[in-house]
Amino acid sequence: VLTEAEFREHFGYKKHRFTGIDYIDYYRELIEAEGATCEVIFSNNPKTILTYTKHVLTSDIHSRFRTKRILSTNGAETVYGLDDILTTSINGSGFNETYGLLGSNKATENTLKLFPNNCQPIVDGIQAKLKELTGKTIEVMVYGDGAFKDPVGKIWELADPVVSPAYTIGLEGTPNEVKLKYLADNNFSHLRGEDLKQSISEYIQNKKEDLVGTMEAQGTTPRRLTDLIGSLSDLTSGSGDKGTPIVYIQGYFDNYTK
């Protein structure tokens, strides 16, 4: 546990390497601009805050349920998360009934853009329209932040509560893949050239529907399809001035035999 003075003594006044902002000063200025006083305490244990106050707004995202539980069971009298704020309309405002302020972005000095709300009819509608026009069943998803960690800045990218708030049914589940290099190095290490290609192709065509726990599937990272495709799309469209309205992906579900 560090006070602000102790933190500065150890780490100084370093600005963020990507944004050029000292976030301690930035948040202090936001708070004091509203006429409130500000005391900054650093801790990696949520229970620490209960030494200072019994009324807590916890602003974490993916660990929010755990943090709320820890605070509530250790004496907090009031516990709110960002997902508890703006879950209903206030004087005609927008709202997100599931996530509240989670995933919101600053729009102006006085307004926020909230995380997409009730967008399942949109993706289903787009899929139905494309089917009508082309005869093809094309999967559709709404995506936000991709789920990856920046290797340089060590920032976990996923500031949204989920990668995709809505997607068509064909994107449910995880990939069911075997590891090509494992097959080549182990199962068919005695083969080369066309014989190797043929054997691997036959193995893929006859693979089990559930490969979880098999050595042939180890290292294929079976994350959810929406997390994988949403991350691909986020990196493709960028977060700045590219202005990419749609990312169209072909061949994602093909494998080596195609």
Image (tube, rainbow, N blue to C red):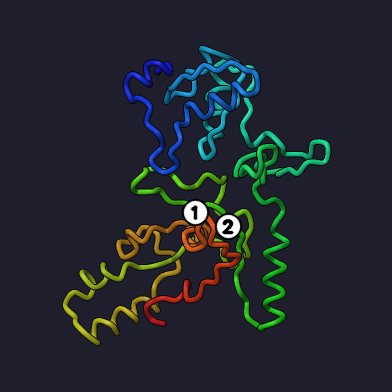
Closer-to-camera residue (252/181): 252
Crowd tier of the residue under label 2, counting other residues whose Cα lies within 10 Å: few below 14, some 14–19, many 20 or above: many
From this view, report whether residue 174 is shown above or below residue 250. above
The residue furthest right is: 91
Which residue is the extreme one toward the top? Answer: 51
Quarter holding residue 170: bottom right
For the residue labelled by badge 2, is the local secondary structure a helix, a strand or a loop? loop
Mark 1: amino acid: Gly
The residue that disc 2 covers is: 143
Quarter of the image with the N terminus is top left
Residue 156 in the figure: left or right of residue 240: left
Q: Quadrant of residue 82?
A: top right
Q: Is residue 98 above or below residue 2?
A: below
Residue 163: x %, y % from top left: 54, 53
**Residue in the foreground of this view, choosing between 54 and 221:** 54
Residue shown at 67%/64% (left/top)? 123
Q: Is residue 219 visible?
A: yes
**Cβ atoms under marks 2 and 1 closer than 8 Å:** yes
Res 186 label: none
Left or right placement of residue 247 versus residue 135 in this view: left
Q: Is residue 200 left or right of residue 111?
A: left
Q: Find residue 184 and report its horizontal and vertical position in percent.
A: 24, 73
User: Which residue is under mark 1?
Assistant: 146
In this view, the residue farthest toward the bottom is 194
Amino acid tagged 2: Tyr
Find residue 207 and report its horizontal and vertical position in percent.
Answer: 39, 73
**Which is nearer the eye, 126 or 3?**
3
